[in-house]
């Protein structure tokens, strides 16, 4: 799932099995990506052992500041 979605894993070795995966906020599959952490998500897609993160590019803040569409 994660490779198909364009997510990037980050494994820091803090503890066995610890890691995080980040995806760009503008990625077309961002909602599916975030749904993998829902407690009521289908067990086939649910991720229990990784932390998820969202990368928000600078352009998002610049456009929001100017009240322009993204």
Image (cartoon, grey):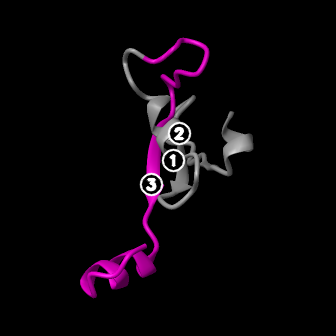
Front residue (pair 63, 5): 63
Specify whether residue 13 is painted magenta.
no
Q: Nearer the viewer, mark 3 or mark 2?
A: 2
Front residue (pair 50, 65): 65
Residue, x 53% and y 36% (percent of image)?
32
Q: Are marks 3 and 1 in contact (CB under 8 Å)?
A: yes
- Binning the other alpha carbons within 10 Å of mark 1 as few (below 14), some (14 to 19) or many (20 upward) gives some
Residue, x 25% and y 84% (percent of image)?
65
Q: Secondary structure at mark 1?
A: helix
Q: Are marks 1 and 2 in contact (CB under 8 Å)?
A: yes
Q: Which mark is residue 54?
A: 3
Front residue (pair 66, 18): 66
Give the position of the N terminus as an image quadrant: top right
Q: Is residue 2 left or right of residue 13?
A: right
Q: Is residue 12 left or right of residue 70?
A: right
Image: 68 above or below 51: below
Return the x and y of residue 61 as percentages of the image width and height.
33, 78
* Quarter-of-image position of residue 41: top left
Q: Is residue 35 left or right of residue 44?
A: left
Return the x and y of residue 31 as percentages of the image width and height.
47, 42
Q: Is residue 69 left or right of residue 47?
A: left
- Binning the other alpha carbons within 10 Å of mark 2 as few (below 14), some (14 to 19) or many (20 upward) gives many
Q: Which mark is residue 4?
A: none
Magenta residues span 41-70
User: Which residue is under mark 1?
Assistant: 30
User: Which residue is under mark 2?
Assistant: 33
Q: Secondary structure at mark 3?
A: strand
- Binning the other alpha carbons within 10 Å of mark 3 as few (below 14), some (14 to 19) or many (20 upward) gives some
């Amino acid at each position: 799932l994660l490779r198909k979605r364009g997510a990037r894993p980050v494994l820091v070795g803090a503890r066995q099995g610890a890691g995080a995966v980040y995806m760009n906020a503008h990625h077309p599959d961002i909602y599916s990506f975030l749904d993998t952490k829902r407690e009521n998500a289908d067990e086939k897609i649910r991720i229990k052992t990784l932390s998820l993160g969202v990368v928000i590019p600078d352009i998002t803040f610049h456009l929001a500041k100017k009240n322009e569409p993204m």
